[in-house]
Image: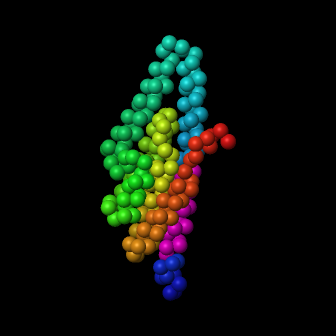
Amino acid sequence: MALLNSRVVRVSVASLATGLLIGVVGTAFRLLLIKADDLRNELVLWAHAWPYIGWLVPVSVGVICAALARWLVIRFAPTAGGSGVQRVEAVFRGEAQPSPHSIVIVKFLGGLLAIGSGLALGREGPTVQMGASLSSLISRVLVKQEADAKVVMAAGAGAGLGVAPRRGAAER
């Protein structure tokens, strides 16, 4: 029974659960970004058939997707703005509170809309922040001490970085 109450076991279980969860979320994010790239490429090819006005469609879709991503951030999770890495670092330094858990959905959907529409944005930041947020959620249940929660958050952020989609992944 003492083994089950061990800090090491709780931190390990929380870190493993976080890694598995961000693995699933990050993989879905990556696969959907690949699909969005394919759809965007098909749209651009279609637009080439209309040489004078065809360019309006991909540009309009990009503007609409970027506006939707911005609206999601402003409306549901203002701390989702930016790459997310700086926010996670600020939480580690004690300069900011962990983001609300709604940030996972906003980062996922907003990142998919913004990056998927072709904006030149980093792909690692969203998965790092999603990993850190998911680890915070798991830590509330499994970990008792704040120092241990930071260890689990670091594991979640690291797992988010590990599962982050890389540029060129669709071409491989």
Q: Position of residue 149 (x, y in %)?
A: 42, 70
Which residue is painted at 55% across and 25% down in the image? 44
Please, is residue 136 above or below residue 47 in the view? below
Quadrant placement of the C terminus: top right
Which residue is painted at 49% across and 25% down in the image? 58
- Please indicate, yes or no, whether residue 141 appears anywhere in the rendered image: no
Q: Position of residue 90 (x, y in %)?
A: 36, 59
Please, is residue 30 above or below residue 36 in the view? below
Q: Residue furthest right?
A: 172
- Looking at the rendering, the stretch of residues picked out in magenta corresponds to 10-27
- Please indicate, yes or no, whether residue 20 appears anywhere in the rendered image: yes
Most foreground residue, 86 or 68: 86
Q: Position of residue 159 (x, y in %)?
A: 54, 59
Q: Position of residue 80 (x, y in %)?
A: 38, 49
Please, is residue 55 above or below residue 20 in the view? above
- Drawn side of residue 75 relative to residue 144, left or right: left
Please, is residue 140 above or below residue 44 in the view? below
Q: Residue 101 magenta-drawn?
A: no
Which residue is painted at 32% across and 44% down in the image? 75
Q: Residue 16 magenta-drawn?
A: yes
